[in-house]
Image (spheres, rainbow, N blue to C red):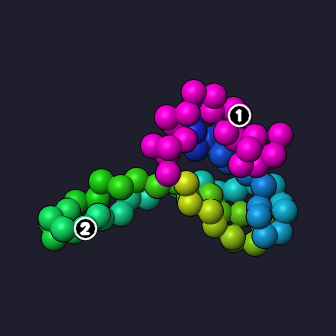
Amino acid sequence: MKLDDLIAKRFLCGKCQSGGALVKRFAATGTGLSRMFDIEHNVFIAASCENCGYTEVYNPEVLEGKDDLGAVMDLLFGG
């Protein structure tokens, strides 16, 4: 299962406690030359609550680097 799908499935809103999220990836520029040349090499995952719109941002490099991704998802969203 893709990381984005896993986040959407396991999401629990930190604000209203509702389940279900709209998940999108977005890119952002860094600093220095990457900003000057508009090179977007920083990719993030945004999960927005389908009920209230509260949005949490995750760094996929950190999550994908974990050996037991299921345990990380349990930690983030409860198990």
Report x, y in % for residue 35: 22, 68
In the displayed structure, 45 sits above or below 34; it is above
Residue 14, above or below 24: below
Query: Quarter-wise, where is residue 3 in the image?
Result: top right
Residue 48 figure quarter: bottom right
Q: Position of residue 55 (x, y in %)?
A: 63, 67
Q: Which mark is residue 71?
A: 1
Quadrant in the picture for the C terminus: top right
**Where is residue 7 drawn, in percent x and y?**
65, 46
- At horizontal 84% and vertical 62% (from top left) the residue drawn is 17
Q: Is residue 18 left or right of residue 3?
A: right
Going by the numbered disc 1, the residue's amino acid type is Ala
Residue numbers of the magenta segment: 59-79
- Tell me the element at label 2: loop
Q: Quadrant of the N terminus?
A: top right
Where does residue 45 sit, x and y in percent of width and height? 52, 54
Q: Nearer the viewer, residue 18 or 79?
A: 79
Distance from the alpha carbon under mark 2 to that under mark 1: 33 Å
Residue at 15% over, 64% down: 33
- Residue under label 2: 31
Q: Give the overall secondary structure of the magenta segment.
A: helix
